[in-house]
Image (spheres, grey):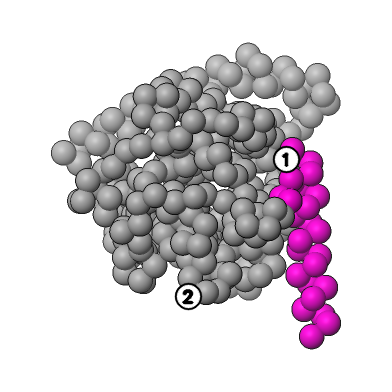
Amino acid sequence: MGEMMDKFMDAFAELFTNVQSALFEGVVQPLAFALGLGSRLEEAFTATEWLLVGLLQLAVMLLVIAPLQRWRPIEPVTDPSAVRTDVLYTLIHRLGLFRLVLFFTVDGYLFDLWGFLHVQGFANFNIDDLWPGITDMHWLSFVLYLVLFDFLNYWLHRAQHQFNWWWSLHALHHSQQQMTQWTDSRNHLLDDFLMAIVWVFIAQLVGIAPSQFVAVIAITQLSENLQHANLRVNFGWLGERLWISPRFHRVHHGVGVGHESQGRVLGGHNFGVLFPWWDMLLGTADFATQKVQTGIRDQVEQGRDYGKGFWSQQVLGIKRLIAVFGSSTQH
């Protein structure tokens, strides 16, 4: 079984590389030369990989998840303009625009940081150091990295709900009361920026191969698209405890349930991204709640404005962040 999985992964990787090369040589490379970026072709080739992965994700969303939403929706779509804004967020991320910003802002600094740390004797921590030969078992090493980064995501997600300053940004994601598969990418850009820095730093730390890193992100993002879908589906008692379902994650977006606990604004339940195991082990799982109203309490009960369009949402997020730091300096 393991040998078959390795052969399948090798075949898929070869096909992906061939398509990436064709896209790069036919479209991206000529464009890079036209823009005077001929000296950055290596980075452009990497950008082509992210673009291709994003296009594949969009294809799955449109051809698989979208029909499922039409088949068994939880609720009718009453605010299509809010959904269109979420589509814009998704395109920014899936078409590589966000990655492009990272490349021109922090990638170089992170590279220099690792160079400095290596000079100081700081070495990467690789899984094959603990389990020699595992890198030859591509499927198994990929699964281990998937679990490792999901554990990281669980704690990052809890931090977004635990610290007032981070919640002031992450609240934008929870302000969508019309949840669909596009909602996953509805985040403040500064929030995504912080998450990306942590992810890239940990990826360097554990020595994950670039191709596996891209695959981990792609699988994680597609699963999150499904979790946010306007889809009435239940994985069953066992399935709900093996992989996070739309029902499980919708509880996380529920007013008074997902991001509140014991009367406090921060806290909550169902922080897992792929696997519900971390919530189960650490006491934050909620399998009992069935129907919830999605949104944020002060938004639903007091009419607080979190913005309707992309730019208003980004500006209001910065204002909330400034207000948090302003109130902390007054105490």
In-front residue for pair 175/102 = 175
Q: Is residue 309 magenta?
A: yes
Report the quarter where the N terminus lies: top left
Q: Which residue is mark 1?
A: 308
Q: Main secondary structure of the magenta part?
A: helix
Report the quarter where the C terminus lies: bottom right
The answer for how far apart the CA atoms under marks 1 and 2 are is: 30 Å
Counting from the top left corner in percent of width and height, residue 261 is at 48, 70
Name the residue located 71 percent from the left edge and 55 percent from the top edge.
Answer: 304
With 325 as the anchor, is 228 left or right in this view? left
Question: Is 67 rendered above or below residue 181?
Answer: above
In-front residue for pair 101/113 = 101
Counting from the top left corner in percent of width and height, residue 185 is at 59, 41
**How crowded is the residue under tag 1: few (<14 C-alpha within 10 Å), some, or many (20+)?**
few
With 69 as the anchor, is 87 left or right in this view? right
- Kind of residue at disc 1: Lys
Name the residue located 78 percent from the left edge and 72 percent from the top edge.
Answer: 325
Question: Is 231 rendered above or below residue 146?
Answer: above
